[in-house]
């Protein structure tokens, strides 16, 4: 097991200043219709230097009351024009464009993934600061195993680094980590680390950080159907008992940890598709697409996506 008191881990929230793309195309669409590289990001203060840690509660205190009062007192002001009462509770992101970002600069693919990692840390920090309760990111799809081995190996190494570097700060500020996807395909060392980190953070309540690795939305739905079929086969339920709610309960996002569906799904780098990500869960998510590549996705881009979300009137099929 990891020893958090004896191992000094570098903060995962150091980030570098990204370069904004020149003329990004952005829009909101309702859901109705590979070589070694030495990358040295500019250091900046860690998340824990700017965020309040989760303090130990006095004996006999009401945890809920103290946390609520502390959050109200310590809640930072939101950048204009964001409104706290209109923020999405759950943001999902398809982090696309790392490779194209690197090629455009004559760099190896690994440099793009490294730069993307720095942006992820910044977006996680902003989500925490602004009070977004759940952040889900598509880090590696089931189809990504077909990429060149050197790129896959680098990504797997990067995933391990993300978890090792992040655990200390996650524990300190109260972030819970969950991973969805077929973990059996991952290296044993990464599987072991995932179990340790998820176990260590399982009682954290400030923000749920969900990382999809080796994930497939179609496979998620398929395994839910298989699980239900087994229950019917063994007489635990009748076919007439199968409802949307029952299917939802069998999805990986609910079997690992019960999560709300994404309110807002962001995809970077100009592609206008979901690419097999949270297919069931995003049925009524608001979709935001931008030409900005993930390594260039900055605070201003995140604010724009959230502002665009706040302008929507969510009907869920009803006439309002």
Image (cartoon, helix red, strand yellow):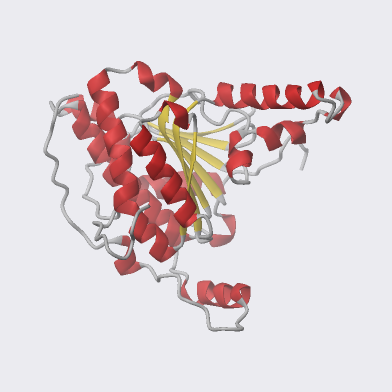
122 is higher (above) or lower (below) than 248: below
Residue 275 position, x and y percent, is 48, 23
Residue 48 position (above or below residue 298)? below
Counting every numbered tag in the picture gives 0
Figure quadrant of the C terminus: top right
Instruction: Please state the horizontal and vertical placement of residue 150, each as a whole percent of the image.
Output: 22, 22
Q: In this view, does 226 lie to the left or right of 274?
A: right
Q: Is residue 136 left or right of residue 301?
A: right
The image position of residue 236, as x and y in percent, is 83, 30
Please name the residue shown 52% across and 55% down the image.
202
Q: Is residue 286 left or right of residue 170?
A: right
User: Between 104 and 229, which is closer to the camera in this rendering?
Assistant: 229
Q: Where is residue 196 in the image (x, y as percent from the top left)?
A: 42, 49
Residue name at image x 46 percent, y 24 percent: 272
Residue name at image x 32 percent, y 65 percent: 5
318 is higher (above) or lower (below) than 122 = above
**Front residue of 127 and 206:** 206
Look at the image and tell me whether residue 80 can be seen. no
């Amino acid at each position: 097991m990891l020893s958090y008191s004896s191992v000094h881990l570098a903060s995962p929230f150091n980030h570098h200043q990204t370069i904004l793309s020149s003329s990004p195309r952005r829009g909101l669409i309702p859901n109705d219709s590979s070589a070694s590289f030495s990358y040295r990001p500019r250091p900046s203060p860690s998340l824990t230097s700017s965020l309040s840690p989760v303090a130990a509660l006095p004996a006999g205190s009401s945890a809920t009351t103290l946390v609520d009062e502390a959050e109200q007192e310590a809640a930072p002001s939101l950048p204009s024009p964001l409104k706290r009462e209109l923020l999405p509770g759950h943001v999902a992101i398809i982090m696309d464009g790392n490779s194209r970002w690197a090629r455009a600069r004559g760099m190896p693919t690994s440099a793009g993934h490294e730069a993307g990692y720095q942006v992820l840390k910044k977006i996680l920090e902003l989500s925490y600061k602004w009070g977004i309760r759940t952040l889900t990111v598509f880090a590696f799809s089931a189809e990504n195993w077909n990429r060149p081995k050197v790129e896959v190996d680098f990504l797997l190494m990067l995933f391990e680094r993300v978890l090792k570097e992040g655990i200390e700060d996650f524990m300190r500020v109260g972030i819970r980590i969950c991973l969805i996807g077929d973990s059996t395909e991952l290296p044993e060392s990464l599987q072991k680390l995932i179990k340790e980190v998820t176990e260590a953070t399982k009682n954290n309540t400030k923000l749920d950080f969900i990382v999809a690795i080796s994930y497939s939305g179609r496979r998620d739905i398929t395994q839910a159907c298989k699980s239900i079929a087994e229950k019917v086969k063994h007489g635990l339920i009748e076919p007439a008992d199968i409802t949307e709610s029952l299917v939802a309960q069998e999805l990986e996002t609910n079997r690992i940890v019960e999560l709300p569906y994404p309110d807002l799904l962001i995809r970077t780098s100009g592609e206008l598709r979901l690419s097999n990500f949270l297919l069931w869960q995003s049925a009524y998510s608001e979709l935001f697409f931008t030409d900005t590549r993930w390594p260039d996705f900055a605070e201003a881009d995140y604010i724009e996506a959230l502002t665009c979300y706040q302008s929507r009137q969510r009907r869920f099929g009803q006439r309002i």
